[in-house]
Image: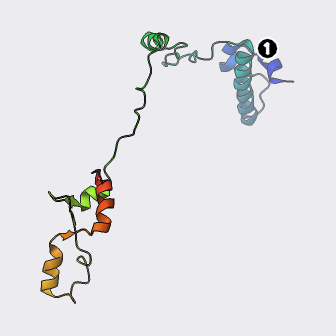
Amino acid sequence: MDLRDICCMVSPSATGVRPATMESAGTLLMEYHLLGRAERACRHANGSDQNRPREGSTRRPRPTTAPDHQREKHQTGEARYPPPSAMPKMKTHSGAKKRFKLTSKDKGRGRHAYSSHILEKKSPKRKRAHARPAEISAHDRTRVKRMLGVSK
């Protein structure tokens, strides 16, 4: 016997009815499971409205078409997004903007290396010098400027 044969025998309102052929709790569960599957197969075979909520449910059915304001937008031919520009925007490197600053004459300034740990062996004069910002070398300056979004 197929599920479609069972669904023709079972009406949707019969899901709450207790089957007469039940012998134990296990068979009761199995029959309820088969009734649910049969009911779903019958609804699918009949092509009934699948968006319809179940009985006793407070859920609203899904709309079958788009809302009016969305439908009008697509019918008039308006684009959803603006057209892409010719060149993408330059973005500042977030790590570089926290670590480097440019002086008024476009020289880069940043922290000294070797100034954060193993300080016992370094002299106070050397530690004071490392505390002040250091000028970035000319070789690194072009990379830092590009990361900061400034022209070469």
* Residue at the image position 20 percent from the left and 69 percent from the top: 135
Q: Residue furthest bottom?
A: 121
| Front position in the image: 2 or 98 | 98
Quick one: quadrant of the C terminus? bottom left
Residue 55: horizontal and vertical position, in percent? 57, 16
83 or 139, which is in the foreground?
Answer: 139
Assign a secondary structure to mark 1: helix
- The image quarter containing residue 121 is bottom left
In screen coordinates, is 109 left or right of 43? left
- Give the residue drawn at x 40%, y 32%: 85
Q: Quadrant of residue 27?
A: top right
Q: Position of residue 118 (x, y in %)?
A: 26, 84
State left or right for residue 81 relative to residue 152: right
Q: Disc 1 residue type?
A: Cys
Q: Residue 79 at what x, y percent from top left?
A: 44, 20
Quarter of the view holding residue 122: bottom left
Residue tagged by mark 1? 8
